[in-house]
Image (spheres, helix red, strand yellow):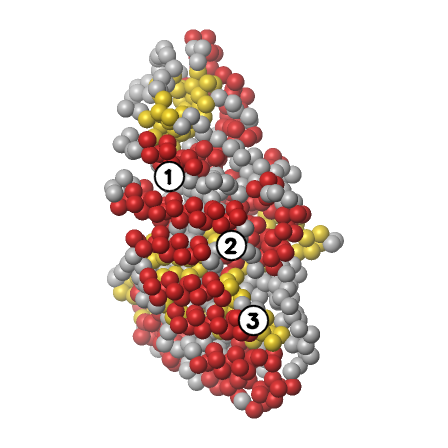
Amino acid sequence: MYQYDAIDRQLINERVDQFRDQVRRWKAGELTDDEFRPLRLQNGLYIQRHAPMFRIAVPYGMLNAAQLRTLAHVARTYDRGYGHFTTRHNLQLNWPKIEDVPDILAELAKVEMHAIQTSGNCLRNITTDQFAGVAADEIIDPRPLAEILRQWTTFHPEFAFLPRKFKIAISGTQEDRAVTWFHDIGLQLKLVDGQVGFTVIVGGGLGRTPIRGQVVRDFLPWQDILSYCEAILRVYNRYGRRDNAYKARIKILVQALGVDAFRDQVEAEWAHGKDGPMTIPQAEYDRVAAHFTAPAYESLPTVDAGFSAKISEEKAFARWVDRNTHAHKVNGYAAVTLSLKPQGIAPGDITSDQMDAVANLADQYSFGELRISHEQNIILADVRQADLYDLWQQARAVGLATPNIGLLTAIICCPGGDFCDLANAKSIPIANAIQARFDNLDYLFDIGEIDLNISGCMNACGHHHVGHIGVLGVDKNNDEFYQVTLGGRQGNAAKLGKVIGPSFSAGEMPDVVEKIIQVYLDNRHEDERFLDTFDRIGIDPFKNRVYEGRAHGKAKAAAKEIA
Amino acid sequence: MSQLIKQQALAVDTWKMLEIADGETPETVPLPEGDILFPLAVWQARKTEIISCHKRIGLILQPDEPVEDIAGDLDYFIVIAVNFPKFVDGRGYSTASLLRQRYQYQGELRAVGDVLHDQLFYLKRVGFDAWVLKDGKDAVNAIQTAFSTFGDVYQASTSQPEPFFRRRAA
């Protein structure tokens, strides 16, 4: 993975000094709270429900073992011994002290980590596919260009005070795993006539006004990506709305202008920057790409005999292999997902001790590197098939081998009302209650692939709109209720789920999910996943079952309210 | 007392902003003598008159006023001030980038309004060379530290037209 050189190191060290001085001036009353707010946000620091919340960047999801050990140490020393992986390649701490944050940043800087621009109305962390570089369906490894984009976003002087936050995702595979259709800019790498470039998608987003992005340029040569992004950002910085935070994202500007007029403005702006100094030279690409070369893979048979034997001997291992390992482009290797979705834990949470254990596993089995997925799990990308059994046993011993990846209980979930100031409702207890209801593994496996995503408010950090089943916390007269959507999905055919009807109380949610699953099981054809059945039979059978016996008048009134 | 920072020092500010009072319009407002920063609407309405009676002309741009409107007039201005009504309104950074990089404006480019210590570094990078620091803020400390927060930069910008990747030692 990428290793810092002199300038990268210098800049993050100077950033630590800068923030230390800003905290000092704020404490001394030289900076007002309003003046300090964007400065701390651009260093990942929120003031939250119980305490500050501190968001550390894991750029495009890549970590090495030493970095994870530092995260474990930081969480243990400055917080309560755990952290939370978010849906955008960040680790959040829920209980740090503001005064400690400069010291935390200094510890992070030693292992080439930071919290730069993880919050605030600026260019945020770049996200990508957790299987970048090893995926069997990869066209181009997105990581070198993700790193080049990371450097471009870091302290960009013109775009530090945008109308609103700005998120970029980049994907280099056949099947999009980076939610590129729902980012401010989504970049899909592709190969056309031997030339590498991007399809540039702009104006997608979840949140309060979920909108699928639109293609602004079908093919942009990779060398032009920085100058083109500058053109997009300049149009947005100048003309994005600043009068209303809810209408300030670029998606609103694209909608208001129409994608064709927006494209015209971007292309007119780009005409000035095209072929200018921000054009990426081949030498720079090569320099960065040299950090992402393949590790020293061994030449291995496609199937390891010992591995095959263990699969037939132990059902629990076979289940884990089935759900938590993934095709690798090199023979005899697999990518492994360590599930952060065991029953009864906040999805995405991990303790410091577990982080240390994962760092050891990475050193022992996966070339000392790991990744974070936007589904809030950890990936060891390069594990020999022959090592999977040992790895599984060690992961199981520290509670990281729940065989549920892609299944109902691997819930994507935001911190919700337990921690977050913005939330309308709690999300973690809902996730835990659903996990408890579906704790029978045979049943869970029988239900098969299904994404259940939960957000505690319409800001949609839990990506509820793109869950096959989406759950959104809403506030009704100071009570917490939950709205359910069906049929959302990520990937190439990404789309938003449809609201099923009036919302439910927290206590009703496990029953509601169970009824939805029951409709699927009653109706599915052989080999149909939940989503396939849903697409075939539509939303009505689900609606009918879920609202069966409920007061129609009340349900009707509430449905109107939602509409 | 205005705290004008130029060339790493506090400087005397001779420029006054022309305010349009109630009942006045850009067409009717009296044009005072001296070093005046004219609002865009006044400049557009009274250009010939201003040129005839002022040797030194200044302009003040609001965040939503497009630089394209004055792109042909830049040679007239000794000073262009860009107003930041709130420091979190980042439009002025694009205004400055365009003035310097696209239209090659050579005169003084001055940030006014809610101008604070922690934005000076970026303001300098996009092309400002004068800053009226907000009243009550420590100008001495700002001059000493705020312009040198970072020793180098990644991106191309006005103050460094070559991105770091083009300056990297081979």
> Between marks 1 and 3, how big is the CA–CA gap?
43 Å
Crowding near pointer 3: few (<14 within 10 Å), some, many (20+)? many
Amino acid type, residue under disc 2 in the picture: Ile
Q: Position of residue A134 (x, y in %)?
A: 62, 66
B67 versus A535 height, above or below: above
The number of numbered badges drawn on the structure is: 3
Circle 2: element type: strand
**What residue is pinned by disc 2?**
A126
Side of A553 relative to A387 (left or right)? left
Pointer 2 and pointer 1 on the same chain: no
Are the residues at dot 2 and dot 1 in contact (C-beta closer than 8 Å)? Answer: no
Give the mark toward the camera: 3 or 2: 3
Q: The numbered mark 3 sits on a residue in which chain?
A: A
- Residue type indicated by callout 3: Ser
Q: Position of residue B132 (x, y in %)?
A: 36, 28
- Which tag is nearer the camera, tag 2 or tag 1? 1
User: Residue A242: image x %, image y %?
Assistant: 40, 41
Q: Which residue is mark 1?
A: B118
Visible residue check, residue A76: yes
* Residue closer to the observer: A162 or B78: B78
The relative height of residue A344 versus residue A61 in the rendered view (above or below) is below
Residue on which the image places disc 3: A366
Q: Are marks 3 and 2 in contact (CB under 8 Å)?
A: no
Q: Are marks 1 and 3 in contact (CB under 8 Å)?
A: no
**What chain does mark 2 sit on?**
A
Q: Position of residue A143 (x, y in %)?
A: 58, 57
Q: Residue at x 55, y 26 (%)?
A: B103
| One can see residue A220 in this view | no
